[in-house]
Image: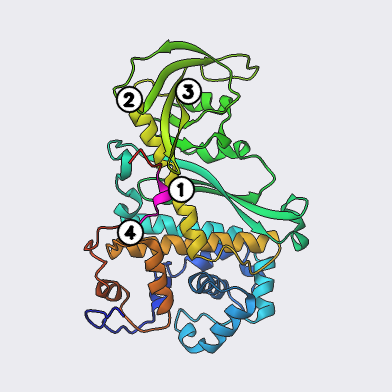
Amino acid sequence: MNQLKKIPARSKFNILRQICNWIPTHLVSQVARSTQAEDKSRSFSPWSHVVSQCYAQLTHSISLNDVCDSLQLHSGPLSSIRGASAPSRNGFSHANRQRPAQMAEQLFWAVLQHLGQQTPGFVAGRRRGAAFRFKLPIHVVDTTVMELVANCMDWAKHRRRKAAAKTHMRLNLQSLLPGFVIIDTAGEHDNKRARELCAGIQSGEIVLFDKGYVDFEHLRDLGQRQVNWVTRAKENMNYVVAQTLPQSQDPKILKDQVIMLSNLKEAAPELMRRVVALVEIDGVERQMVFLTNNLEWSPRSVADLYRCRWQIEVFFKQIKQTLQLADFLGHNANAVRWQVWIALLVYVLLRYLSYVSQWAHSFTRLFTIVRAVLWAKLDLLKLLDCYGTAKGSFRNLAQPEQAYFPGFR
C-alpha cells in the first residue's frame, strides 16, 4: 500500500466548502433572481440546490435518496457552506423539475468568466500536442449522446425503444474549457447546430470538427469570415481537381490537392484543400481524407490538426467516467439539463483546482482523491502536494492511448 510522504495540513473548512468557495458569494442569488428561480424556492434555497447538485456530481450519487440521505447525515458540516441545507427527496425532485435550468446555465458561464478574470492563465491555456506551433486559438466542435430511459422520457425520444439527450460543444484546445454548449434531444442532425457553435469564433482562429458537422454553405461562411477550418470529407462528395500540389516527402501523405465541388445546388466554398493520408487504426493502415480551406499549411499540419480533434473525445470520456452523467436524478428535460450544466460546472472547478495546484497527473485521479475526502478538514492544495503529483513533479499525464491516431505520434 502506498503511504503518503507527509500528513497534509489541517484546515478550518472541509474539502467541499473549499471547492464551493470558488463560486462567488452573491453570484448564485443574482442568477436566481435574473432567471426567476428564486420565486420557486421556499425552504430549499437556490444555493442549497447548487451545493446539492455539486455534491451529487462529486460523489457520483445514483439516486435522489443517495444525495438526500447523505447530506442529511452531514447536515452540520453542510450548514457551514454558507448556510446550505440538506434537501428532502420531494423538495430536491421538485426543484430539479420546476426551477429553470437557465439558472444552472448562466451560473456556469458566470463562474467560468469570474475564474478567468481572477486567473487569466487558466482560460488562456497552453499550446499542447501536435498543434504546439499554432499560436492562434484552436476550437474543437463535437457532440456526445447520453442514453436515457425511453419509457419515462418522451421528450427525448431518439429511436423506437431508446431515448437520448445530446450535448453539442465547442471546446478550446489550449485550455480544455467549453466555449459554447447546447443541450438538446438527440433526434436532430449535428450539422443543424454548426452555425450556433461556430458563431463566436474570430477571424484567423481555427476550428476542427468531424464530418457530421459538414455543411458546405456554413463552410463557405466560415471562409468569408477568415476562419480556418479542418474536417473530414464525406464518402459521396463530388468534386473536380483544380490543382495537384507538389508531393510531400512524408510517405504517409498520399495526395495533396486543391478541389472544387461539383453538382451542388447550395452555396459552397470556391476552393478547398483535400489531403489524403495513411492512418494506422487498430494496427491496420487505412486512408483518411481531410478537407480544409487553408491552402498554405503543409499537408502534415492539416493531418496533425485533425488529430488534435480527438482531445474533445478525451474530454467527453473524462466527464462521463468521473462525473455523474449516467444515472439522472430526474426524468424531465429540465432536470436533465440541470444535471448536465452542474456536471460542467464541477468539471471547471476541478480544472481550476488542477491549475492552481499545478497538478500533473490525470484528471481521473484528481477526482478520486477529492471524492474520498469531501468532508475532511484538510488543506486541499497541501493534500494534493502530499501525493507528489502537484507542482509539476509528475510529467506523465496518463492520457489514454486511444486518444491519438497511431502512426501520427
Query: Which mark is in front, 3 or 1?
Result: 1
Q: Where on the picture, by quarter, is residue 355?
A: bottom left
Q: Which residue is mark 1?
A: 312
Find the distance from the CA under tag 2 to the CA under tag 4: 38 Å
Task: Give the image location of residue 220, x and y in percent.
Answer: 52, 23
Q: Which residue is mark 3?
A: 224
Q: Amino acid at mark 2?
A: Ser
In this view, 90 is above or below 119: below
Find the distance from the CA under tag 3 to the CA under tag 1: 26 Å
The quarter of the rendered structure image containing the N terminus is bottom left
Query: Which mark is in front, 1 or 4?
Result: 1
Task: Give the image location of residue 95, x and y in percent.
Answer: 65, 71
41 magenta-colored: no
Task: Please tell me whether mark 4 sits on a helix, a strand or a loop.
Answer: helix
Asked if residue 202 shows in the view, the reply is no
What segment carries the magenta color? 397-404
Q: Which residue is mark 2?
A: 298
- Of labels 3 and 2, earlier in sequence is 3
